[in-house]
Image (spheres, rainbow, N blue to C red):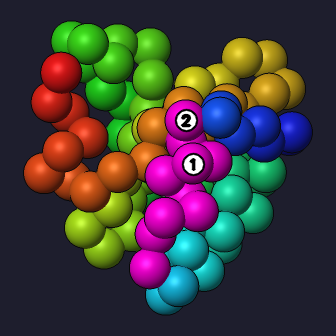
Amino acid sequence: MDVFVSAEAHAKFEKLPKTIKARVAEIYERLEKWPAVSGAKPLRYRFKGCFRIRTGDYRIVFTVDGETIRVIYIDNRRDVYEE
């Protein structure tokens, strides 16, 4: 699987604390092994068709399109689902 990160998600990634950045980078590597990724949950409502995986208080929202994973959003859990 190929993992692509949107410009918005990459901008958030760059602003993360160093320890969280390392954990998110590990999640990118795990996503390459899709669908054998533990902890991923399908989302509903506004993010219908997307999945999320968490690390600490942060959520990584992504889509799966054939052989491509697109990370579309990274944020703190309190902010990620707000419009």
Residue kind at label 1, given as amino acid type: Ala
Q: Splitting the image into 4 quarters, where does residue 35 fall? A: top right
Q: Which residue sits at x=55%, y=35%?
A: 8
Q: Position of residue 10 (x, y in %)?
A: 62, 48
- Residue under circle 2? 8
Position of residue 80 relative to residue 33, above or below, is above
Residues packed near mark 1 inside 10 Å, few (<14), some (14 to 19) or many (20 plus) = few
Placement of the N terminus among the 4 image quadrants: top right
> Magenta residues: mostly which secondary structure?
helix
The image position of residue 12, as x and y in percent, is: 49, 52
In which quadrant is the C terminus drawn?
top left
Which label number is shown at residue 11?
1
| Magenta-colored span | 8-17
Q: Nearer the viewer, residue 83 or 51?
A: 83
Which residue shows up at 79% across the image and 51% down it? 32
Instruction: Identify the image quadrant of residue 14.
Output: bottom right
Label 1 sits on a secondary structure element that is helix
Number of marks in the rendered image: 2
